[in-house]
Amino acid sequence: MPGRRTVLRGAALTPIAGIALTACAGSGGGGTPAKPTAPVELGAESEIAKGGAKLYREQNVVVSRAENGSLKAFSSICTHAGCAINKLQGATLSCPCHGSEFDAATGKVLQAPATVPLEELSVEAKGGKIIVGPGA
């Protein structure tokens, strides 16, 4: 039979586990789709330097520019548990839920638990603006 201390410890931890699961499950966009469903203007093309990247949190998109000037875009929804990635440091995207890391230039996984790369999105520069999504 479990002791009083064991029962109380288990009861105290149960709500915390539920909160963590809810936080992860609900952070995949909060009403924002995991990826644009129509072309979306993100901002000025000049915002992203060659070799750099920018995270557009509200649209769940990261855009990078290669040294040759070409653009790449990826969904910034973690492929592990669907959490919205909210941190870009250099070219590394970090998921707040379980610590997965991704390369913003390639979408490849740099650190588990994620094993699947980020989803690549269509992107183009048009009239000095970055447009991402279907038809871009």
Image (tube, grey):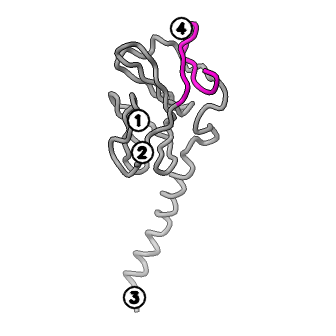
Give the distance between the C-alpha atoms of the residues marked 4 and 3, in whole angstroms: 67 Å
Residue type, numbered disc 4: Gly
Left or right, residue 111 beside residue 41 = left
| Residue 87 disc label | 1
Whether label 1 touches label 2, CB < 8 Å: yes
Q: Residues within 10 Å of mark 3 (few under 14, many from 20)?
A: few
Label 1: state its secondary structure: strand
User: Please, is residue 109 above or below residue 135 in the view?
Assistant: below
To which residue does mark 4 refer? 128
Residue type, numbered disc 1: Lys
The residue sitting at 32% across, 27% down in the picture is 90
Give the distance between the C-alpha atoms of the residues marked 1 and 3, in whole angstroms: 43 Å
> Measured from the top left, where is residue 115 in percent x and y?
40, 48
Q: Which of labels 4 and 3 is toward the front?
A: 4
Label 2: state its secondary structure: loop
To which residue does mark 3 refer? 2
Q: Is residue 135 magenta?
A: yes
| Residue 63 disc label | none
Label 3: state its secondary structure: loop
Q: Which of labels 4 and 1 is toward the front?
A: 4
Q: Residues within 10 Å of mark 1 (few under 14, many from 20)?
A: some
Which region is colored magenta? 121-136
